[in-house]
């Protein structure tokens, strides 16, 4: 192999290696949006995060976050959902379209 060919390959390797590690390029290429996972109880419109162990639900017309489920209700059936936001009720209008109220045990 000629010296010119070897130098060309070394230059190409350095160029490609540097390009792959330029700030922003490699991050954008490998950046994945983190999904937040919840159990959603359509019958009661309650969310539960098993990661932070918190319930999200309406109380007197305001969304609240509590370590315990709302008192005096049966949560019933649940579905597992993934959302882009760490505050599930911001996606509630979309969630209730996908998961209408399900009543029953």
Image (spheres, rainbow, N blue to C red):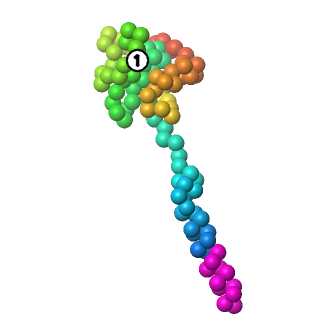
Q: Residue at x 39, y 30 (%)?
A: 49
Residue 65 drawn above or below residue 14 = above
Which quarter of the picture shows residue 60? top left
Identify the residue at the far front of this view: 23
Which residues fall within the magenta stretch? 1-12
Residue 55 drawn at (x, y percent): 36, 23
Q: Nearer the viewer, residue 7 or 51?
A: 7
For numbered disc 1, what is the local secondary structure?
A: strand
Which quarter of the picture shows residue 71? top left
| Residue 71 in sight | yes
Left or right? Give the position of 70 relative to 97: left
Q: Quadrant of the N terminus?
A: bottom right
Q: Nearer the viewer, residue 55 or 64?
A: 64
Q: Nearer the viewer, residue 19 or 47?
A: 19
Q: Quadrant of the C terminus?
A: top left
Label 1 neighbour load within 10 Å: few <14, some 14-19, many 20+: few
Residue 41 drawn at (x, y percent): 45, 20
Q: Residue at x 46, y 26 (%)?
A: 88
Residue 81 drawn at (x, y percent): 50, 30
Left or right? Give the position of 93 relative to 37: right
| Residue 30 in sight | no
Q: Which residue is mark 1?
A: 63
């Amino acid at each position: 192999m000629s010296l010119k060919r070897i130098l060309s390959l070394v230059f190409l390797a350095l160029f490609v290696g540097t390009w792959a590690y330029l700030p922003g390029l490699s991050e954008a290429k490998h950046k994945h949006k983190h999904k937040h996972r919840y159990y959603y109880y359509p019958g009661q419109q309650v969310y539960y995060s098993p990661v932070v162990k918190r319930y999200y639900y309406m109380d007197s017309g305001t969304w609240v976050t509590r370590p315990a489920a709302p008192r005096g209700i049966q949560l019933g059936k649940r579905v597992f959902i993934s959302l882009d936001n760490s505050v599930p009720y911001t996606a509630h209008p979309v969630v209730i379209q996908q998961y209408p109220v399900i009543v029953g045990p």
